[in-house]
Image (cartoon, rainbow, N blue to C red):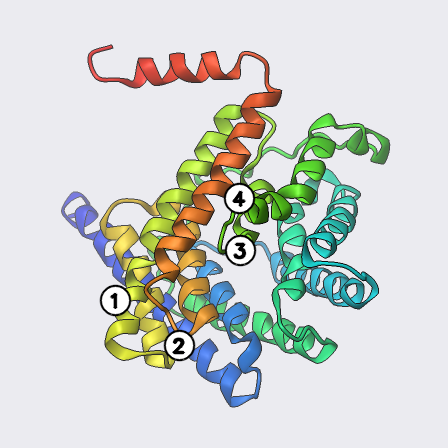
C-alpha cells in the first residue's frame, strides 16, 4: 500500500504548496491594502511566498523573531542614512551598503545567513521615491503580516506525513566554527565583496543598464569565495528569474493586478517550478515572481527582457570578480565543464 501511494505524494504536495502560496499571498495583499499598507504590500507578498517551505517542515522558532528584526534594522539604516548623504544615488548606495555590510560582518558566524539579507534590505529605501519612517513602518508591518499568513497556512495544511518520524531522518546542519570579531574582519573575501558591491551600481550605470540595481544585487547575493559556489548561485538566479516572470506576465495580461491575480501569479509560479522538477530554484523564482508582480504593478512588456538582461549583467559581474581573484579558477571551471559533457 505504501509503495503505491508514494508516487502520488509528490504531485499532491506540489498542489498543496501552490494552494498555500496562492492563499497566503492573496490574503497578505488584501490585508495590507485593507490596513492602508499598500506601499509595503509587495514586501509582505514576497515574504509570504518564501516563508512557505516546499516540504512543509517547521521553521525553527527563532526565525520568526530574527527575520522581522533584520528587516527592521535594514530599513532603519537606509531610511536614517538617506537624508544624511548629500549626493547622487550611486554615492548613497555605496555609503549605505558599506555601513550595512560592516554591521552584518560584525554578527556572529551562526547568523551568517542574514548578512546578505541585511545588505539588500538596507538599500531598499534608496530605491523608493519617498522613503519615510512611516513607509518603513508600513513595510515592516507588511513583512510581519506575510510571515503570519505564510507560516500559519503552512501549519494549517501540514499533514502527519510531512513530519519526520525519527529525529535522525532530518539531521541538524553542522554549526560553523565560531570566529572572533577580528578574524571575521580579517577575511579578505569580505573586503573584496564590500569594494565591488560599493561600486556595482556605478558600474551598472556606466554600462547603460536600465535597472543598475540588479548589478548590485548580483554581487551581494551571488558572489562567493569560490568559483564553483558562485557558478551555482548564478545558475540558480538565472533559472529563477527566467521562470519567475512567466506567470506574472501571463496573469497580468489576463486579470490585471488584484488579490486574486496575486494569488494566481505566485501560486502558479510555485506549481510551475514543482511540475518542472525545479524545486531547488523555487525560492529564487518566488522572489522574482513576487517582485515582478506585486512590486511593479503595471507589468509593461519592456520590463521583462530588460530585467533579465540587467540580472545577466549582475551575474556576469559576480562571476567575473570570482574568476579574477581565484587563481586557476578558469582552468578548473573549464575542466569541470569538459567532464560534464556527454561521452567525456
Residue at mark 1 to residue at mark 4: CA–CA distance: 30 Å
Position of 176 relative to 205 (above/below): above
Q: Which residue is mark 1?
A: 250
Residue 59's disc number: 3
> Mark 4: which secondary structure?
loop
Residue 27 quadrant: bottom left
Depth order, front residue of 160/184: 184
Residue at mark 1 to residue at mark 2: CA–CA distance: 17 Å
Mark 1 or mark 2, whichever is nearer to me = 1
Return the x and y of residue 237 as percentages of the image width and height.
43, 44
Position of 250 relative to 175 (above/below): below
| Residue drawn at (29%, 52%) of the image | 273
- Pick whichever of labels 1 and 2 is earlier in the sequence: 2
Labelled pair 1, 2 in contact (Cβ < 8 Å): no
Return the x and y of residue 217 as percentages of the image width and height.
56, 48
Q: Which residue is mark 4?
A: 207
Return the x and y of residue 77 as percentages of the image width and height.
76, 61
- Pick whichever of labels 4 and 2 is earlier in the sequence: 2
Any part of residue 132 in sight: yes
| Residue drawn at (27%, 78%) of the image | 255
Residue at mark 3 to residue at mark 4: CA–CA distance: 41 Å
- Pick whichever of labels 3 and 4 is earlier in the sequence: 3
> Mark 2: which secondary structure?
helix
Depth order, front residue of 59/83: 83
Amino acid at each position: 500500500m505504501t509503495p503505491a501511494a508514494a508516487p502520488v505524494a509528490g504531485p499532491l504536495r506540489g498542489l498543496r504548496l501552490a494552494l498555500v502560496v496562492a492563499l497566503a499571498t492573496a490574503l497578505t495583499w488584501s490585508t495590507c491594502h485593507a490596513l492602508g499598507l499598500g506601499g509595503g504590500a509587495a514586501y509582505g507578498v514576497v515574504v509570504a511566498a518564501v516563508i512557505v517551505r516546499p516540504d512543509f517542515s517547521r521553521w525553527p522558532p527563532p526565525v520568526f523573531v530574527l527575520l522581522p528584526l533584520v528587516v527592521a534594522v535594514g530599513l532603519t539604516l537606509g531610511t536614517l542614512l538617506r537624508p544624511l548623504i548629500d549626493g547622487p544615488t550611486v554615492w548613497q548606495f555605496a555609503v549605505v551598503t558599506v555601513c550595512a555590510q560592516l554591521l552584518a560582518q560584525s554578527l556572529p558566524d551562526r547568523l551568517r545567513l542574514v548578512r546578505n539579507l541585511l545588505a539588500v534590505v538596507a538599500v531598499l529605501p534608496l530605491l523608493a521615491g519617498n522613503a519615510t519612517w512611516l513607509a518603513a513602518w508600513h513595510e515592516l508591518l507588511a513583512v510581519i503580516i506575510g510571515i503570519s499568513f505564510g507560516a500559519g497556512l503552512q501549519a494549517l495544511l501540514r499533514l502527519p506525513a510531512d513530519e519526520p518520524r525519527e529525529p535522525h531522518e532530518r539531521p541538524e546542519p553542522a554549526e560553523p566554527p565560531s570566529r572572533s570579531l577580528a578574524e571575521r574582519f580579517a577575511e579578505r573575501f569580505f573586503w573584496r565583496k564590500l569594494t565591488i558591491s560599493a561600486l556595482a551600481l556605478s558600474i551598472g550605470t556606466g554600462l547603460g543598464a536600465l535597472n543598475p540595481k540588479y548589478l548590485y544585487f548580483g554581487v551581494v547575493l551571488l558572489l562567493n569565495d569560490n568559483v564553483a559556489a558562485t557558478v551555482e548561485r548564478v545558475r540558480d538566479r538565472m533559472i529563477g528569474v527566467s521562470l519567475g516572470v512567466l506567470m506574472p506576465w501571463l496573469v497580468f495580461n489576463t486579470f490585471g493586478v488584484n488579490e486574486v491575480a496575486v494569488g494566481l501569479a505566485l501560486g502558479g509560479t510555485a506549481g510551475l517550478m514543482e511540475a518542472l522538477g525545479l524545486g531547488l530554484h523555487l525560492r529564487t523564482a518566488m522572489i522574482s515572481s513576487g517582485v515582478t508582480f506585486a512590486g511593479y504593478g503595471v507589468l509593461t512588456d519592456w520590463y521583462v527582457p530588460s530585467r533579465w538582461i540587467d540580472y545577466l549583467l549582475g551575474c556576469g559581474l559576480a562571476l567575473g570578480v570570482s574568476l579574477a581573484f581565484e587563481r586557476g579558477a578558469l582552468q578548473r571551471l573549464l575542466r569541470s565543464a569538459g567532464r560534464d559533457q556527454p561521452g567525456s
